[in-house]
Amino acid sequence: MRPRGNRALLTVLVVGVCLGVVAIGGITWLNHRGSTTDHGANPGAAPPPTTAVPARKKLYGKPPSACSLVSPPALESLYPGAKGEEDDVDTPALENDYYSHECRFSSGGSGDFGIRFMSVRVYVLTGQHALQTNRGTYVDDVAHLSRSVNIRTVEGQKAVRGYGEEAHLIYGLDSENCRTAFLLVRTQNAELTLKYGGCNSPGGMDLEPVDRTTALNGLYTETHEVLTNLATIK
């Protein structure tokens, strides 16, 4: 028979271990609960896809409608209730064909979450020197990007990997004090300009700029969607 003192010590140790497990479990549950975010109430906030965008191995011809490059499910997650308005300019020529297809998305008013700005522009130049010309056009467009977009206060800009051959990001506050992000992408003989941002309206109060994460996540999700669908075009 073991001494009573050892039995009492064993009881204390068991109780302590049990309490520690309960405490750790409670902390873990609280941390998990606290990290949960309702992305549905803040369109565009969900993390962008991590899968690689299919690489385009041949030059583009005439692009499809820019609005068709964003699927209905993707549009609903980025801009609930929005519809696209297409604006195409096609200029066939003897040596080089020029195509500019743009889609601006709008919902006709502010949603419960606030407002969003979202657009896609696809520019394609075909012909013998299309690839070389497009490289030069991209360099010039990057150099003038801060002056060609509606950003009053530039908060950041940088080169971004993982989208086409080259991509350049710029974001900041626009003239309406909403946060907007633009991404310029060069892929083969095509150049894309993508825009995403807006303002939130928490509790129906005055509009506030979306946070940087929402603007950038929304932009990258939009870009991934457009490039993935564009890569499948023959």
Image (cartoon, rainbow, N blue to C red):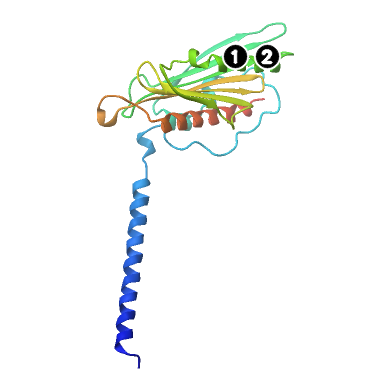
Is residue 225 shown left or right of residue 62? Answer: left
Number of numbered labels in the structure image: 2
**Dot 1: element:** helix
Determine crowd level at label 1: few under 14, some 14-19, many 20+ residues with C-alpha closer than 10 A. few
Where's residue 203, x and y in %?
Answer: 25, 31
- Taking the spot 36% from the left edge, 19% from the top edge, the residue there is 108
Residue 210 visible from this viewpoint: yes
User: Callout 2, which amino acid?
Assistant: Thr
- Which callout, 2 or 1, points at the residue further toward the start of the chain? 2
- Can you say whether 26 is above or below 99 in the image? below
Q: Residue furthest top?
A: 94
Q: Residue at x 59, y 29 (%)?
A: 163
Decide: marks 2, 1 in contact (CB < 8 A)?
A: no
To which residue does mark 2 refer? 133
Q: Residue furthest right?
A: 128
Name the residue rendered at 63%, 19% in the picture. Answer: 190
Looking at the rendering, which quadrant does residue 227 occupy?
Answer: top right
Which residue, given by chain and number where applicable, does mark 1 sit on?
A: 140
Q: Can you give x and y, in whole percent of width and height, for residue 130 in the image?
A: 69, 15
Disc ID at residue 97: none
Can you give x and y, in whole percent of width and height, for residue 170 in the image?
Answer: 49, 23
Name the kind of residue labelled 1 in the image: Asp
Q: CA distance from mark 2 to mark 1?
A: 11 Å
User: Quick one: 138 or 193, which is closer to the camera?
Assistant: 138
Side (left or right) of 202 relative to 232: left
In the figure, is residue 49 to the left or right of 5?
A: right
Q: Quadrant of residue 132?
A: top right
Quarter of the picture containing the C terminus is: top right
